[in-house]
Amino acid sequence: MNKRKNQATLSAAEKQAFVNALLALKTTVPSQIGLTNRYDDYVQIHVDSMMATPGWAHRAPAFGPWHRILLRNLELDLQAVDPSVSLPYWDWSVDTSNGTVQGSPWTDDFMGAMPANTDSVTSGPFRANHLWPINVREPGDTSTSLTRALGRTQFQDPNAQAPTLPTPANVQGALQETPYDAPQWNKGAQPSFRDRLEGWHGPGSLHNRVHLWVAGSMLPSTSPNDPIFFLHHCNVDRLWAEWQRQHSALPYVPAANTAGAPVGHRLTDPMQPWGGAVTVQSALDHHAVGYYYDSEPAPPGPGIVVPLLNLPGFGPHGLTSLPRWQRIVAPHGHGHGMEMGPMFDLSPEDKQAGGHDTGS
Ligand code: CU1
Ligand code: CU1
């Protein structure tokens, strides 16, 4: 079975293989939905997830399952380029430096080091004017290359500054929260592990804070433009898997047919754009999806079930019928298909503390 490793432990050769596979998706593997390349398909699908009503993937229960399948699909595409590659995770509660220190992903043999006085990525494999143009953009967004703040507040959203990353205590606190989700199944639902992991409540603003800390290309709905998106979400997925292990008696909620729960987020609902056999339920056991983490015991057996493998690539489900290229995150205007407001924000607890984390 596919083993996902902590990026801090990758060898130089493993880093290079991962980077090369990403570059291949961006430069040589064709799009399956009429875009420039296969990598950009993932950016567009993430945008589309926000355009649908109800949304497919955020501020609602399927936040965990939907991103799990998106990541697995990318991982399968990477493995079609190089079977030795698997998706690494960035444990942002431990490897917190924005410099080129041991364990940092911000090095020129991996995600790229940051220069001191700009938020432009100017070195490493994803640098400007090299192999990583930003093609899928929200209207009004003119940056055609990657930008990152990495905790420097002068380059961050002035309304949601994150000088620091979530702490191990923030993570441990969130892992204690049950049940998985709760009515109203939305942003701010409590108590809800999903809502706390996403970062809408609780100390540390976990997932959201990491987007706000990296900032730049990680702020809009096109955030998968930055490959760190996938290492970030891989860690988010790992934390969900850890929560599932620690609370194995607790079911996914909402169950099928739960009144008032959004379509696409109940247990047996198909998830878009995959549809068909890719349901919320099919994503619950990550071993059945085809991988495990180096931070958990190796599961017995090959464990390959993966309905995903037998499906065609992203089909027309829901994609061609959706309006594209409309600004979704509108600081001064209206969103489309979702509530107004920034895509990511600090929790009320962290807002009160001026962007600093607020304990555990
Ligand atoms: Cu997302
Ligand atoms: Cu995210």
Image (tube, helix red, strand yellow):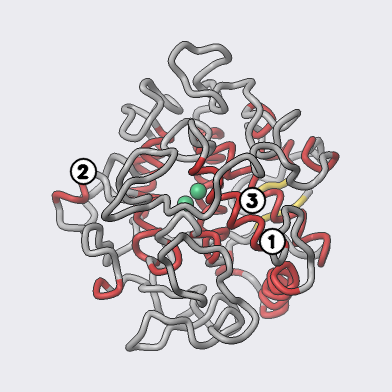
Residue linked to disc 2: 348
Residue at mark 2 to residue at mark 3: CA–CA distance:
29 Å
Of the numbered discs in the image, which one, if any, rests on residue 35?
1
Of the numbered discs in the image, which one, if any, rests on residue 71?
3
Discs 2, 3 touching: Cβ within 8 Å:
no
Q: Which of 10/306 is in front?
A: 306
CA neighbours of label 3 inside 10 A, class few (<14), some (14 to 19), many (20+): some
The response on whether ligand 1 sits within 8 Å of label 3 is: no
Q: Is residue 100 visible?
A: no
Residue at 64%, 71% (x, y): give it.
10
Residue at 26%, 45% (x, y): give it.
347
Mark sitting earlier along the chain (2/3): 3
Where in the figure is residue 182, as x and y percent of width and height?
39, 23
Above or below, 29 relative to 288: below
Discs 3, 1 touching: Cβ within 8 Å:
no
Name the element at disc 3: helix
The response on whether ligand 1 sits within 8 Å of label 1 is: no
Residue at 38%, 30% (x, y): give it.
186
Residue at 85%, 39% (x, y): give it.
310
- Amino acid residing under circle 1: Leu
Where in the figure is residue 108, as x and y percent of width and height?
56, 85
Residue at mark 2 to residue at mark 1: CA–CA distance:
38 Å
Name the element at disc 1: loop
